[in-house]
Image (spheres, rainbow, N blue to C red):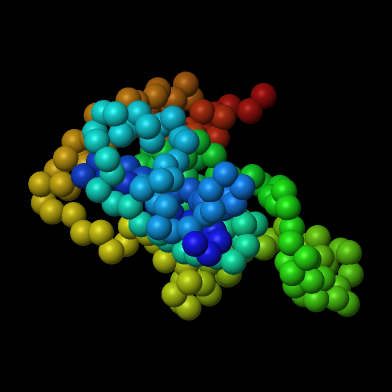
Amino acid sequence: MKYTPYCYVIGWSELDTWYCGSEYGKVVKTAHPDNLWTTYFTSSKHVQEYRDKYGEPDVIKVHRTFFFADDARRYESDYLLSIDAAANTHWLNESNGSKNFKCDVVSDERRRRISNSLTGTTQKKTKARVDGWARSAEIRKRRSREGTWISPTQDIGHTEETKKKMSKIAKNRPKQSCPHCSREIDPVNFRRWHGDSCKMRKVA
C-alpha cells in the first residue's frame, strides 16, 4: 500500500453534524484512503460519543489526498480555519488546528521544494508569505474558482423531513443571556457578537 496522507470529512447528515480530520502516519500503520472507517477511526472523543449515541456516520468522505504529511495537516488546519469549525456548533472539532503549524518530520524532497520556492526571498517577505499561506480570502476565493477548495458537504442534499429535524435541533440548542443587551443567544453567535463583543457593552 502506497503511503498517501489524506484529509477526510465524516458526518451525520440528518443531524447536520460533521468532523474534519486527516491521517498521515506511517510508523504503526501506513496512511491511505482505503483505511478510512475500516482500520482507521478518528480518536476524537466527541465523534466517539456521537457514534455511541447515533450510530455510524452516514457520510464518510475522503476530501483530498497528498504526497506529504505536512501538506495534509496544513490543509486540514486551513480548512477548519476557513469555516471556523471550533466556534461552529455543526462541527465536532474542538480547535481549528495549530496556528503555528509545524511538521514533525520534513523529508529531503520537501526541504528542496521549500528551498526552491523561497530562493531570492527576503526574511520579511518570507514571514509574510508563511503567515498568510492559504488563509487570505483571496486565496480561498481562487481555490474555490479552481475547484480545489470544495465544501465537503455541498453535494449532500436534505429531504424536507431532514430539514425539519435539523430545524428542531437548532431551536432546542441551549441559549445564553447577554449581560449587556439581555438577549438570549445561541453559543456560536454569543461568542462572536455578544458578551465582551456586544455593541451595548459600556466601556469604562
In the depicted view, which residue is nearer to us: 41 or 150?
Answer: 41
- In this rendering, would 22 be left or right of 89? right
Residue 160 visible in the current orientation = yes
Q: Residue furthest left?
A: 161
Compared to 89, does 119 lie above or below? below
In the depicted view, which residue is nearer to us: 105 or 138?
Answer: 105
Instruction: Count numbered badges in the picture.
Output: 0
- In this rendering, would 3 be left or right of 18? right
- In this rendering, would 128 be left or right of 90? right
Quadrant of residue 57 in the image? Answer: top left
Give the x, y percent position of residue 162: 15, 47
Residue at 89% x, 64% y is: 123
Quadrant where the C terminus sits is: top right
Residue at 74% x, 58% y is: 106
In the depicted view, which residue is nearer to us: 4 or 146?
Answer: 4
Compared to 94, does 96 lie above or below? below
Give the x, y percent position of residue 135: 61, 60
Residue at 19% x, 36% y is: 168
Give the x, y percent position of residue 1: 49, 62
Residue 137 visible in the current orientation = no
Quadrant of residue 173 in the image? Answer: top left
Give the x, y percent position of residue 54: 24, 33
